[in-house]
Amino acid sequence: MAILVTGGAGYVGSHTIVELLARNEKIIVIDNLERGHQKAVLGGYLSVGDLRNDEFLENIFKKNSIEAVIHFAAYSEVEESALKLYKYYENNIFSTLKLIEKMIKYDVRKIVFSSTAAIYGNPTITPIDENSPETPINPYGETKLAVEKILKWYNIAHDMSYISLRYFNACGAHSNGKIGECHKPETHLIPLILKSILKKENKVEIFGNDYNTRDGTCIRDYVHVTDLAFAHILSLEKIRKENVASIYNLGSGCGFSVNEIIETVRKITKTNIKGEVKPRRAGDPDVLVAKCKKIEKELKWKPKYDLQKMILSAWKWHKNHPNGFED
Ligand code: UFG
């Protein structure tokens, strides 16, 4: 039987595929390639199509014997989500409903779902555990929370077994040098700094230095994409053994400010980067740091990459692929 990976041409999806292949899993990948990259899919069978296309989805389930689904396909830009509501609600929620209904039709009742720390909004207590209030402050977080609720009810009504993984700030690149972070346009802090160095501009905008943090800049929990990918493997193992309805935080448990990230990149690349302070970006919480005790205990997951290793791996990827997958 095969594992169906939706959005497998995206950042976390493509890294998870490498881990699945290393374990000789049979995989079917689907991606509409709107934001994903064909070259990022290093194995398995890629079908290009959209979850909202019923005929396409029906064919995937009819032609393949699918055991479980790992569902990455979604839009994931916080700022964009606040402007393009229909786009986000339709792609992130309606597509997932179509997928789940198809799973029920073909009696596939195991799903690992990509969720996000954006579900917590602006938390009052840090680090954040899975019982913290779910109060998103942007539509992106709302769409992911809505899917978590949908999964809860499908679990009750249809025995849909699920694990929802709430990612904090994914970063870094695969050690094989073939895949890494490539968003167009790029909005994330670490790739933006590294790209600026490659363009010899050596600068980065700092969105606000008046947050309630140790140096005034936002604190985030950065976690390596290979560590995230491995959590999907452990989730799959768990879901194969038992009917679960579980939610886990996925972060490193350590928070770094924007200034600290810039400083670490400076040291690793031996480049003097100028930080230009700009107004706050809408929807940015002061601090987002995960408490990951639950996944450590229940799935025996522990991140292997520290901040230096994460940034070094990202730096290698960007140096060798300044144009992303077009190189
Ligand atoms: N930042 C800057 N300058 C930049 C880019 C980012 O100062 O040029 C700051 C942001 O304001 C934020 C931090 O760097 O404080 C990290 O920003 P990123 O854009 O790299 O990542 P986000 O924290 O905004 O987003 C990530 C994921 C989202 C997820 C969110 C949860 O990419 O999918 O974490 O909060 F929803």
Image: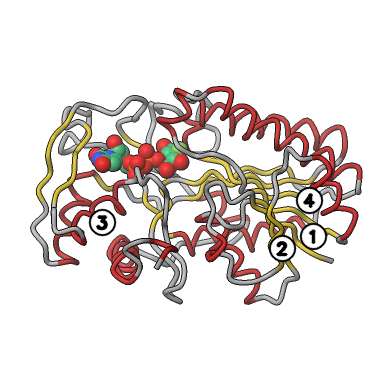
**Viewer-side label of 1, 3:** 3
Asked if residue 178 lies left or right of residue 221, the reply is: right
Label 3 and label 2: CA atoms lie apart by 37 Å
Q: Position of residue 5 (x, y in %)?
A: 68, 56
The alpha-carbon separation of the residues under discs 2 and 4 comes to 11 Å
**Which residue has dot 1 on it?**
241
**Badge 2, how many Cα within 10 Å: few under 14, some, many 20+?**
few
Residue name at image x 34 percent, y 43 percent: 187
| Quadrant housing residue 269 | bottom left
The residue carrying pointer 4 sits among few (fewer than 14), some (14 to 19) or many (20 or more) residues within 10 Å by Cα, namely many
Callout 1 crowding tier (Cα within 10 Å): few <14, some 14–19, many ≥20: few
Amino acid of disc 3:
Lys
Quarter, ligand 1: top left
Q: Which mark is residue 110?
A: 4
Question: What secondary structure is found at the residue carrying circle 2?
Answer: helix
Measured Cα–Cα span from mark 4 to mark 3? 39 Å
Report whether the residue tagged 3 is closer than 8 Å to ligand 1: no
268 relative to 245, above or below: below
